[in-house]
Image: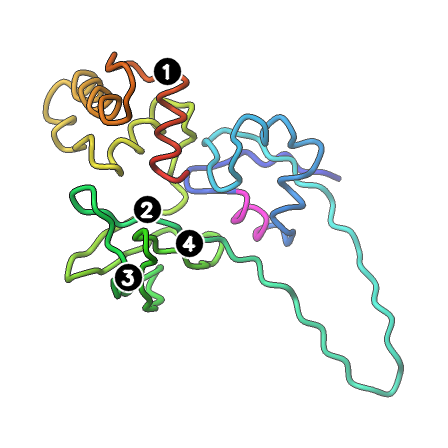
């Protein structure tokens, strides 16, 4: 019997699918989740309180001959960490980095546009990129949808337009409005300080998600 799973903070389709032993696409493309898919647009970004319908698992049978050993491999279901490392508007291009995902260390190089793009396990909660001796920490699974105020603020902060500490120390609404204006000016938009649909779209494009 299908389950109605209410999304908690830090959950996404990948982690929910892993919990119930299903492929992410099985959940994301299920007809009962079509409205959620249309609303969110990205299976990595859900809002706490969203409801995901988890269908019953289907039994799969394989034919094999007797008297022999057979090996079956379960397909991996990785999520991905994809971030763009930028300093002063210029990407950290082709730079070596180390990555710590919940204590699992790996190394690599950014691409020509400064991206770190690696598979990670579903349900990972924290990532730390060390590059040029600096550490950049990411709380995974906590990005709110772009059509929410929290989601817009997170993207402004990640892009360097909003300083969370400054916002908390003073008038948060005024700090966010100023950050929105700066972003709109650089994006060639009318600097109203209001997050309209066009501004949200440009934020998603600039942020990459």
| Relative to 96, 145 lies left or right | right
In which quadrant is the N terminus drawn? Answer: top right
Please name whichever residue, 89 or 102, is drawn nearer the observer in this view of the structure: 89
Q: Secondary structure at mark 2?
A: strand
Q: Magenta stretch: residue 189 in it?
A: no
- Camera-near label (2 vs 1) is 1
- Camera-near label (3 vs 4) is 3
Disc 4/disc 1 C-alpha distance (Å): 32 Å
Q: Secondary structure at mark 3?
A: loop
Residue 133 is tagged as none
Please name whichever residue, 204 or 27, is drawn nearer the observer in this view of the structure: 204
Q: Which residues are magenta?
A: 13-19
Q: Which residue is mark 2?
A: 139
Disc 2/disc 4 C-alpha distance (Å): 9 Å
Disc 3/disc 4 C-alpha distance (Å): 25 Å
Residue 124 is tagged as 4
Residue visible at 20% across and 36% down?
160
Please name whichever residue, 144 or 87, is drawn nearer the observer in this view of the structure: 87
| Colour treatment of the image | rainbow
Tell me which label, 4 or 1, sits earlier in the chain.
Answer: 4
CB atoms of marks 3 and 4 within 8 Å: no
As displayed, is residue 37 above or below residue 83?
A: above
Badge 1 density bin: few <14, some 14–19, many ≥20, Cα 10 Å:
few
Badge 2 density bin: few <14, some 14–19, many ≥20, Cα 10 Å:
few
Q: Secondary structure at mark 4?
A: loop
CB atoms of marks 2 and 1 within 8 Å: no
Q: Which residue is mark 3?
A: 94
| Relative to 8, 137 lies left or right | left
Tell me which label, 1 or 3, sits earlier in the chain.
Answer: 3
Q: Which residue is mark 1?
A: 196
Badge 3 density bin: few <14, some 14–19, many ≥20, Cα 10 Å:
some
- Camera-near label (1 vs 3) is 3
């Amino acid at each position: 019997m299908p389950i109605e799973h209410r999304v908690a903070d830090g959950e996404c389709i990948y982690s929910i699918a892993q919990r119930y032993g299903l492929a992410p696409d099985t959940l994301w493309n299920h007809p009962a989740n079509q409205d959620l898919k249309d609303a969110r647009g990205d299976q990595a970004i859900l809002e706490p309180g969203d409801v995901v319908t988890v269908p019953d698992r289907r039994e799969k049978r394989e034919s094999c001959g007797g008297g022999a050993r057979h090996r079956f491999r379960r397909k991996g279901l990785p999520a991905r960490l994809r971030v763009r490392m930028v300093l002063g508007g210029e990407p950290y291009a082709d730079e070596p980095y180390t990555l710590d995902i919940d204590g699992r260390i790996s190394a690599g190089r950014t691409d020509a546009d400064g991206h770190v793009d690696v598979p990670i396990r579903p349900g990972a909660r924290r990532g730390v990129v060390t590059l040029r001796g600096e550490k950049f920490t990411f709380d995974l699974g906590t990005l709110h949808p772009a059509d929410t105020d929290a989601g817009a603020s997170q993207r402004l902060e990640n892009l360097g337009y909003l300083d969370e500490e400054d916002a908390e120390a003073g008038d948060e609404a005024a700090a966010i409005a100023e950050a929105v204006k700066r972003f709109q000016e650089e994006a060639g938009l009318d600097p109203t300080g209001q997050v309209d649909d066009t501004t949200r779209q440009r934020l998603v494009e600039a942020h990459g998600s």
